[in-house]
Structure formats: C-alpha cells, structure tokens
Image: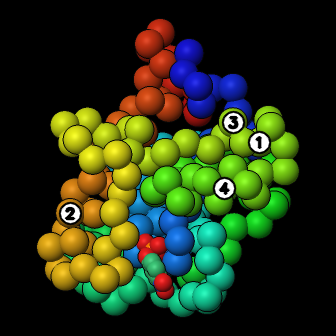
Amino acid sequence: MTIEDNHMSTNGKYRILFVCLGNICRSPAAQGIFQSIVDRAGESDGFEVDSAGTYSGHQGDLPDRRMREAAASRGYVLSHRARPVTSMDFLDFDLIVAMDDNNYADLMHLAPSVESSRKIKRMAGYLTGHSISYIPDPYYMGRDGFELVLDLLENACTNLFRSITEDGNGTCPVR
Ligand code: 4NP
C-alpha cells in the first residue's frame, strides 16, 4: 500500500499535477518525462498528467525554448501551455508535486482543506542517488542547469512511477 493509493480519482485514472513557479521550465518538463514513462510502460489509460504554475505571468506560453530544446535532445516533446494552479486542482488531482520549497509552501497556502493539502508532495522526495533537496530553478542558469534539472526529473519521475505502480504486494493501484 502506498501513500498514493488512498487518493484514486473516481474515473479510474490516477491524476498527477506537477507544479513549479512559472510552469515553463521544471513542471512541464516533469509532465513530459512522466508521461513518457507512463506511455513506455503501456499505462497511458491509467494516468492523467498535467502541470501548472504558482505564478500566472506566463499563462498560455509554451515551455521556455531552452527547456524545449534540452528536452527534445532526450526525446521529450514539450507542448504544454502554461496555466496557473486553481483551487479546483486540489479536488481534481490525486497527487500534486512541488518542485521546490517555495512551490510547496505556496501550494500548502492555496490548499482549500487539510485533506487536499495531504496530496502535496515534494519532487525531491522521490530522488535517489542525489543529495539535493529541491529541483533548482534553471531560468537564470545556462545549458548545464537545464541538463541538471532533466537529470533530476528523470530520476524522480522514474521513482514516483514505481511508487504508484508497485505497492509492495505486486498489485498496481492504477489498474
Ligand atoms: P519554472 O522557471 O518555475 O521552472 O517554470 C521559471 C520560469 C519563469 C520565471 C521564474 C522561474 N519567471 O520569473 O518569469
């Protein structure tokens, strides 16, 4: 039994929302990476994957060109359009994953109930083999920053997917 088991939405899909500040770098990359893992595992029918930002200034924008290019070189096509987090997201999604501590604090503040606040997790909590406790904002970094973020997100998304699909009893809560 995983933490995530308790929050299955009624349509049978497990719904995950990735959240960062602008929704143009980290969270759309996490969305694309996680969707790719889901698709490769043949679990596309079992998941709904989305992303949003705590800041609305980039609403409607494609992901940052630097992130799209870095992601494309790893085979991820990022076509999400930025949108802000809404209060409905806390009802609609089973799991809400924050990229850093500021995103986490903002989400905890926005959560309309204690129950919905329990859906909020830190992305770095799914990292293995890394000592960093957050996904750094690459917006003011160079190319290396974007590559580091993609490395971290690939690791965390793989472990997050496993945490949902492997519950220790060999059963998958999304099937
Ligand atoms: P993100 O990166 O939160 O990973 O999408 C940022 C994008 C834009 C800004 C900050 C961070 N900004 O200040 O416009």
State how far apart marks 2 and 3 are (Cα): 28 Å
Q: Residues within 10 Å of mark 3 (few under 14, many from 20)?
A: some
Q: Are marks 2 and 4 in contact (CB under 8 Å)?
A: no
Q: What residue appears at the point 25 percent right and 79 percent down from the top-left corner?
A: 141
Decide: is 113 above or below 86. Answer: above
- Residue type at the position of mark 2: Leu
Q: Are marks 1 and 3 in contact (CB under 8 Å)?
A: yes
Circle 2 residue = 148
Q: In the image shown, does 133 or 82 lie closer to the viewer?
A: 133
State how far apart marks 1 and 2 are (Cα): 31 Å
Is residue 24 found left or right of 130 in the rendered image?
Answer: right
Q: Earlier in the sequence, mark 1 or mark 2?
A: 1
User: Residue 96: x, y in percent?
Assistant: 61, 49
Quarter of the view holding residue 81: bottom right
Residue 107, disc: 4
Disc 1, SS:
helix
Q: In the image shown, does 44 or 167 lie closer to the viewer?
A: 167
| Quadrant containing the C terminus in the rendered view | top right
- Residue type at the position of mark 3: Arg
Disc 2, SS:
helix
Circle 1 residue = 116
- Residue type at the position of mark 4: Leu
Q: How many marks?
A: 4
- Residue type at the position of mark 1: Ser
Q: Earlier in the sequence, mark 2 or mark 3?
A: 3
State how far apart marks 1 and 4 are (Cα): 10 Å
